[in-house]
Amino acid sequence: MNFMQGAYGFDSLSTFLIFLSLIFNMWHGTRFLGTLLFIYALFRVFSRNTYKRKKEYDVFYSYASKILSKVGIRLPYNTAPIDFSDIAPLISNLKYKINQKRQFKITKCPNCGQKLRLPRGKGKITVTCKKCLKDFKFKT
């Protein structure tokens, strides 16, 4: 999953442009402008020219901080762009959880609240909690 390696990534300006494009895409008359803003935001995210993207962010930060300072809000400058290089373990963890949900039914012991993982498709079974040793019937 190295396609984002070296790319600039999401920052506050990209997030702002995507949010603005979603607002402009609500109306038919401004849909073209909204689409252009969205394409430009994606271009910024996947760009490998980090120097120019940082300069664009500096200009955005100076104007946004002037506007927000009048309201009393301070925009943090040192927020790093979001890095997607660690997304592969998250996806594999999600696949594992979905697979576990298909094969097993998760329930709680009615006595102590301990989570129990039971096999699906076994019908009505008697379950013994390993924590409190209480027996109860459960349909899987």
Image: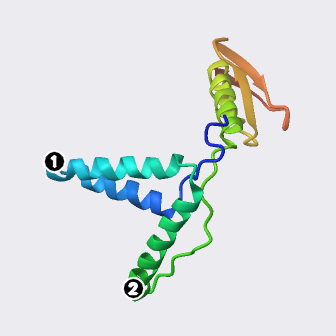
Q: Amino acid at mark 2?
A: Val
Q: Which mark is residue 98?
A: none
Which of the 4 image quarters holds residue 122?
A: top right
Q: Nearer the viewer, mark 1 or mark 2?
A: 1
First in sequence: mark 1 vs mark 2: 1
Answer yes or no: is residue 61 visible.
Answer: yes
Q: Residues within 10 Å of mark 1 (few under 14, many from 20)?
A: few
Q: Secondary structure at mark 2?
A: helix
Position of residue 108 measured from the top left corner of the image (x, y, whole percent): 69, 36
Work out which quarter of the rendered image holds the C terminus and state it: top right
Q: Amino acid at mark 1?
A: His
The residue wearing badge 1 is 28
Question: Residue at 65% of width from left, 22% of height from top?
Answer: 99
Foreground pick, 118 / 87:
87
Marks 1 and 2 sit apart, C-alpha to C-alpha, by 32 Å
Position of residue 93 measured from the top left corner of the image (x, y, whole percent): 69, 34
Vertical placement of 129 versus 112: above or below? above
